[in-house]
Each structure stands twice: as C-alpha cells, then as structure tokens.
Image: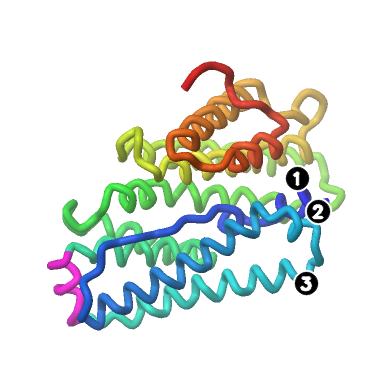
Amino acid sequence: MADARIGRRRLGAVLALVVTATLVVGCASVNRLREAQESFNQAATLENELRFDAALQEGSMQGQLTQNTTIQNGYASALLSLDKIEAKDVERLKQDRLWGNVLALKALAQWKLGLLDRARDTAREVQQVGADQVLPRDRALLLALPGLIKTDEAFAALQRVPAEPTPEQRASTLKNVQLLVADAADAIDRGRGAVDAAHPVHVYLIQAKLAAFRNLQSAHERLGDGDARTLPREQRLEVQRQLKELKCQAERLSLKPEIVNYWANRFTLAPEPGAC
C-alpha cells in the first residue's frame, strides 16, 4: 500500500534538493534570496523525510495531505520572496554573482509548484546571463529541467488513463510515455555532462533519471500486453547501471544506503555488479 501511494506522487514530491549560495549581508535583495533559500530548503527537507519515513508512508492519508500542503506552501513562499526582488536590485545581484542563483532557484520553485511554462521561460532566461553568473550545479539543474518536466508530463499521462482503457488508449499512452521518458533521460544526461564527475549534484540527477524510468516501468505494467508488461531489457540494464552509479556516488559522499535501497525496491532490481 505504501509503495502504491509513493508511486502516485509526482516527481517533484519524491525528490529533494537543498540549494545554497554564499550571501552578502546588508542588501534587501540578498535578504529576499536568503528567505527564498530557507523556504525552499525547508520544503525540500520535508520532501526527503516524507520519502524515507516508512512510518509516515503507512500512516493516514490526512497526515500525508497535511505534509504535502506544507511542502507546497514552502515552495510558494520561496517564489514569493524571489518575486519581491526589485528591478533596481538586479544589478547589485549581478555584481555579487548571485543573479544566476536567483533565476535557478525561481525555475526550480516554479517547477515544484507545477508552473511548467513559467519554469521553462525562467530557464531560458538563465541562458542569456553570463557564465560567471551561473554556478556549475545550477547550470546542470537548468539543463536537466526540461527532463524533469517531461517526467512530470509522463506521470500526468498515466494518471489520465481510465480504469478500463481501450486498446487504442493503451497503445497511444504507452507510446507517449516512452517518448517522454526518452526525452527526459536525454535532458538529464545533458545536465550531468555539465559538471565534474565528482559533483554532488549527480546524486540528485541520477534519482531524477530513475524516477523517469519508474514512470516507464509503470506504463508497461499497466498498459503493455504479454512480454511488453515488463520494462524492456535495455531499460532494465540502464536502471541497473544508474543504481550502481547512485551506489558509488552515495558511498563517496558517505550517504546512507537507504537512498539506493529505495530505488532498488521500486524497480525490484539490484545495482549492476562490479566495483565503483
């Protein structure tokens, strides 16, 4: 029952990301950025707890709804703080090399709130600022953002499937999810390619790719016929490779093994064997 409830959550409700930046004290716009970071991080931390807290997963639906409302309010508060930054303060933020951080945080908050068109527009705006304004982590996340959105769209497509779909609905939805997940994986790989192999953001992006493939697995289980009711072999092998990469990154960063176990259990697959 707990697994089913987790499976029904959108990607933004199962991935947590904490953002940081070195902020200068004394500027109103920087204070707005600090407020936004604090709100975003509180919401992200609560998401992470919701994901790994087995007791809550087995708890009441009302408790989960309360937690999800708190999470959404946190992201909304972050976006509100960023929207209060005045035009006259933008130049100061650029001088402090924080404007890229503002835009990245705004795009992520918009995505988490389901404001997908606005998130895309903000991500495109970041491409217009100088490279010195965008941290490697932020650049990786913004390159991957279209993939995160495609993953949400794949999830939404599955939610629209009626209880008793026609053969045409089954075939068209499965094909749609396959295309969305392929695009998502490509975008996430582009994000990962923008940072050093040892960068901690890989832990987040690997999980984002696994979430995309989990949608694909669900689509095959619900809509496929015969052998097509399971994840194709090529995708299963890719999931195992991603699980191994996640395991290696987690060990390097001294993270708890639960992060790998969570995804391995979702797919009922083990990481690819071999040393890191």
Instruction: Report x, y in % for residue 266.
Output: 70, 39
Q: Which mark is residue 62?
A: 3
Please say which color scheme the image uses.
rainbow
Real-space Cα separation, disc 3 to disc 1, in angstroms: 33 Å
Residue 121 magenta? no
Is residue 164 depicted above or below 124 in this figure? above
**Secondary structure, magenta segment, majority class:** helix
Does the image show residue 65? yes
- Amino acid type for the residue under numbered disc 1: Gln
Q: Which mark is residue 162?
A: 2
- Helix, strand or loop status at disc 3: helix
- Residue at 52% across, 73% down: 74
Q: As shown in the figure, which amino acid type bears the numbered disc 3?
A: Gln
Identified by mark 2, the residue type is Pro
| Residue found 43% across the figure and 73% down from its top | 78
Residue closest to the eye, 228 or 185 = 185
| CA distance separating discs 2 and 3 | 25 Å
Question: From which residue to which does the magenta span run?
Answer: 88-96
